[in-house]
Image (cartoon, rainbow, N blue to C red):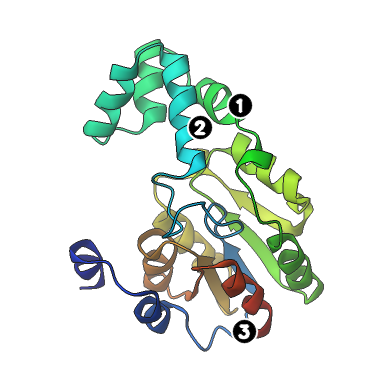
Amino acid sequence: YCQNLLGNQRLSTEFLKAMYQESSPARASVVVIDMDGTLYPFDTPDNIYQGSKLEKQVLENAVSLAGSKSVIEDCLNNKIPLSKGVSEYLSISKSQYFEKVWGKIDPLQVVSDKSSAEVVKVLVANNKELILLSSSPLIWVNKVLEYLEIRQCFSQVFTAEDFRTKKDVFAKIAFKYRGKTVVSVGDQVTTDLIPAQQAGISTYLISAPSDLQALILNI
């Protein structure tokens, strides 16, 4: 029902928070955190990847790598992941694609708010085990974490190379930490929150940097 509703109309931030920013992830010992849009906001009104500086740089680098704008447009029109479409077109590995596209992006040009670093450090100081779960490639994740100086704060890091869908990872985390309170923190309902709840994991919706800072008090 929720997924259909999300597909049919844009829900208000207040409504989404009521559904997914649970009031009882308190005393969670394990915190699963998304990266893009969560540890730093996108520069778009709705805090989404589409239309952001990050997407524009990815597209620009992908076009440069492929040497053809039509290849990129074909991937987008047919909902083919750029990493798959471009790597097959050029007969290169996805790792090579990630290195030449995502590896050329400077976090300084994308990450405008570094306040999340302090939040992460406080959570660790409060004895929370932190797990990063990102759909971005490892090379970009490492760049952002190093820029924020918080790589050492995460006991585990899952990136695009490690899973097909986040649902698979949430299931593994729920099994590994059964008996403990786990909370998933993210900005995307369909990928960060719904699959977490399906695995029996509490959720906390991030729609603005202030939500992330409030996380310290709520868990």
Name the residue rendered at 53%, 63% in the picture.
173
Question: What's the distance in space between the residues labelled 1 and 2, CA to CA?
Answer: 9 Å
Compared to 148, does 215 lie above or below?
Answer: below
- Give the quadrant of residue 62: top left
Quadrant in the rendering for residue 14: bottom left
Q: Earlier in the sequence, mark 2 or mark 3?
A: 2
Tell me which label, 1 or 2, sits earlier in the chain. Answer: 2
Which residue position is annotated with label 3?
218
Identity of the residue drawn at 51% across and 88% down: 23
Q: Which dot marks residue 57?
A: 2
Judge left or right: residue 106 versus residue 11: right
Q: Residues within 10 Å of mark 2 (few under 14, many from 20)?
A: some
Q: In which quarter of the image is the N terminus?
A: bottom left
Question: Is 130 situated above or below 66?
Answer: below
Which mark is in front, 1 or 2? Answer: 2
Q: Residues within 10 Å of mark 3 (few under 14, many from 20)?
A: some
Task: Determine the secondary structure under disc 2.
Answer: helix
